Image (cartoon, rainbow, N blue to C red):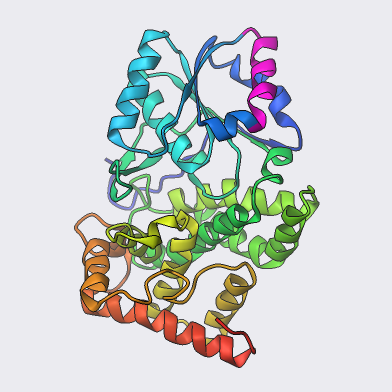
Amino acid sequence: MPAINEKVFISPARYVQGEGVTARAGHYVSALGKSALLIADDVVWKIAGEQLSESLKGSEVRFERVAFEGEASTREIERLADLGREHDADVVIGFGGGKAIDTAKGVAEQLNAACAVLPTTASTDAPTSALSVIYSDDGEFESYRFYDKNPNLVLVDTAIICKAPPRFLASGIADALATWVEARAAIRANANNMAGGKATLLGATIGEKCEEILFEHALLAYQANEAQIVTPSFEAVVEANTLLSGLGFESGGLAGAHAIHNGFTALHGEIHNLTHGEKVAYGTVAQLILDQTPQAELEEYLELYLALGLPITLKALKLDQASDDDLYRVAEAALKEGESSHNLAYELTPQQVVHAIKAVDVHARAFMEKVGLSE
């Protein structure tokens, strides 16, 4: 455990991004091991499995591809770790979205193996971090699981990512926009970051730069994604979503936005059809309200979220029929002991969190009316 006021910055050993870099995966993975457990679901495998297979074979990396069953749960990690032991895997490859990647990191830790992460979307900042978000088999948030090291390799192929639905890029932008909002709050409160220490100047600067890139390039990148083309703005946003957000949240710190997201997972119903980032977007606005953010700044976030089709009303969040009891369940989960909501410079009650959740809806609808948008 770091000493009081000890600063800590952590990161993956190598980050590689570019159009078509999957063809170089074998080159990079072969430096980590020669027997790989490759975790990917069937959808991802159909999209780019052949290309990855050829690259690994070309570099004489043996691999056993196993199907990811969809949830980053303790049961799934243990199931895949058993398969890794059967195949004497010395490297684990996570190929897919955030939950497949978090699962791969957990499997690598259990096997004491190297970890290579190949995201197929830019929808979360999971690829670079030394932690997994663990859910129950039913998709309810359970805990963060921390590891001794970050992934050995993060390889991001923008040719693959630009083919993913734009909704995933928007989700990643929402996740990444929470980075500086939460990190600056945690730094203000002198709270520890996800690495167990205080933020370095670099950790804080990365989070701030992440937000700057997103406000400048998010819409251009989204439009490029709609056309399935790779542009400089698309590359910049993929890097912000993945690398800058990943380093920024982990070495800067989390606060209210992700805690409220975690609270939302305690509910059942249609909200479970929303992505991680879509729920984080709502949590981010709630934290901005709790932080007493000036109206003009708050509306900058609302404007971008709306342009990207992100849910910032209770109706869009599938909670317009939610009762106060439902919202109090969200609040109580968000304020549990150990949650990142305690990294704020002020103490919160469940009622204050419920009121913030309702205020997001009120302010968002007022802003939409102001700019002539209908829900």
The residue that appears at 37% across and 9% down in the rendered structure is 86
Which image quarter: residue 16? top right
Chief secondary structure of the magenta portion? helix
Residue 200 appears at what percent x and percent y?
A: 47, 52
Regarding residue 347, the answer to whether it shows in the image is: no
Residue 263 appears at what percent x and percent y?
A: 30, 61
User: Considering only vertical position in the picture, is 157 above or below 163?
Assistant: above
Q: Is residue 50 magenta?
A: yes
Residue 333 appears at what percent x and percent y?
A: 23, 61
The residue that appears at 72% across and 30% down in the rendered structure is 21
Q: Is residue 54 magenta?
A: yes
The residue that appears at 80% across and 51% down in the rendered structure is 231
The boundaries of the magenta stretch are 47-60
Residue 147 appears at what percent x and percent y?
A: 35, 34
- 340 vs 119, left or right, is left
- 68 vs 302, left or right, is left
Front one among 248 and 288: 288
